[in-house]
Amino acid sequence: MAVPELRAAASRREEMLVLGARALKGRTTVLVGIGQPNLAAALGKLLYTPELIMMYESGIIDGGSEKLALSIGDPALVKGAAAICSMFELFAYYLGGRRIDAGFVSAAQIGRTGDINTTVIGTYADPTVRLPGSGGASDIALLVDELLVMMPHEKRRFPERVDFVTSSAGRSMTVITDLATLVMSDGELVVTAIRRGVTRDQVRAETGWPVSFTDPLGSTPPVTADELAAVRRLDKDGLYS
Amino acid sequence: MPSTQAGEIKVAKVMTMAEAVRRFVTDGDLVYVAGFSHAIAFSSGHEIIRQRKRNLTLCRATPDVIYDQMVAAGCARKLIFSWVGNPGLGNLHCISRALADGLEFEEYSHFQMLARLVAGGTGLPFYPMPDGSGGELARHNPNLKTVTDPFSGSKWIAVPPLRPDVVFIHVQRSDRKGNIQMWGVVGDVRDAAASGRSVIASVESIVPDDVVRRDPNRTILPGFLVDAIVREPWGAHPSPVQGHYDRDNEAYRSWSTISKEPNRVTEFLDEWVYGVDGRAEYVRRQSPRLNALEVGTSLSEPVNYGSA
């Protein structure tokens, strides 16, 4: 089987996925959304947290696949899973019963106070863009101990206030972007680390409010060859990186 | 019907999809086509389109391509949902156009939607959700109301019961009495069916009673809740059915292109919905590409139900 030749360095998106994987160290249970969060969590389980129990809102618990799922009800995730429960059981017992450590989602917009929007751009009554809405995201944000969010760092996605509050800010929140890591501190998202080669001015330029940086500011340990190989193996079609 | 023979009544449950839709769906009904990302009852939606049912309130957690097609065909007066998109591919374009043109809708989070079904199915007056549930939706959806916990005095958000007039489900198998067995992602199927005034189940196969009775724990719905059984192989295509066929990702991708242009939507419906008399003909015409969706075999060990 051909092994793809590794490029010299990780792309910003590959680095973001690796940081998501690292962020799950020490967690036991995580409810993941499909797409980049799923890939990052799968990477974390593979590299750092083999006991991590990944769950999907479809009711799949500890899904069995190394194949990357396009849908959270993918039959490939069912085969080899530890359990399948109904959606209601998942939301009521495990999420509502506060049995899930972390949620890992993506977002269209995130605001200064950590509110997330996946519902509309513009007004709710007359939107310029209609987005999918909550799905389970607002329930997850409300009912997990820690919310991880992964999204590209662009000014239009980081407004001072989101157009619509789909999910209120969680108690504890970490936002991992291709430029920086932000966490909630005194009710506001602040930058705790920036990527190597990224400047504060770049982060400021792509953030819609006068964002604060912690002092000292963390740097991001470089992506290792193992991490890079794993992310490219998991996402061999390059769908998410 | 004067018959008192239990056997005749049971047999009478088995019918075609055309007959089930004719008998159980009335214009103006609240309809729930169940199946969360798996085993979506597509063939029922197509039959509803063929019979030109109108003014339906279409309810599903995730409207998916099936409701995009039903909305495009003019079946819907209103949409109730909690996540409206073509998974991984962006918008449901027909629904987006209809919403922009003023199609009435009600929006929830997934947990709220499921809680509405559970309240409906169990006879509760409402289901309490944690304060903050649904974010800003509470300002726009009058069905999200604040209640006080009579024990602690804390604030909750109440959602009302949902009782669809007709619920369509698609599963792997049932017997002729409608005892429903399903595996893989069950999703919203049981909760939707238990809340429905009528339940129509399409199945990949109808099996002898003793097949069901040798494995009663796999039954997710007892037959007395089920009004009609339709033998409909490939009834969920292009969604997958565990152990039967894979998701037709290409069909979902293709719909994401087709649905951008209303004239191509019309052509699609003419060819694949109005142009076939039912799922069997659809399957015959799709068959070259359906072969690619075959799945492997992965058996679980039998369990011992032995008793003294």
Image (spheres, coloured by chain):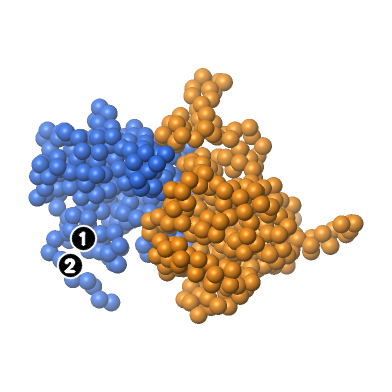
User: Where residue B29 appears, x then y in whole percent?
Assistant: 65, 48
Q: Amino acid at mark 1?
A: Leu
Which residue occupies 49% across, 24% down? B155
Give the colour chain A carries in the figure. blue
Q: Chain of mark 1?
A: A
Give me the C-alpha separation between circle 1 and circle 2. Answer: 8 Å
Q: Is residue B71 visible?
A: yes
**Chain that is orange in the image:** B
Res A156 quadrant in image: top left
Which residue occupies 39% across, 47% down? A130
* Vertical order, B276 against A14 (above or below): below
Which residue occupies 46% across, 56% down? B94
Identify the mark at residue A228; answer none if there is no mark: 1
**Within-10-Å neighbours for mark 1: few <14, some 14–19, many 20+:** many
| Residue topped by disc 2 | A6
Front one among B143 and A134: B143
**Within-10-Å neighbours for mark 2: few <14, some 14–19, many 20+:** few
Q: The C terminus of chain A lies in which quarter of the figure?
A: bottom left
Q: Chain of mark 2?
A: A
Res A186 quadrant in image: top left
Q: Amino acid at mark 2?
A: Leu
CB atoms of marks 1 and 2 within 8 Å:
yes
Front one among B32 and B170: B32
User: Where residue B19 appears, x then y in whole percent?
Assistant: 72, 63
Q: Is residue A8 left or right of residue B120?
A: left
Res A35 quadrant in image: bottom left
User: Where residue A96 appears, x then y in whole percent?
Assistant: 48, 37
Ranked by sequence position, the earlier of labels 1 and 2 is 2
Q: Secondary structure at mark 1?
A: helix
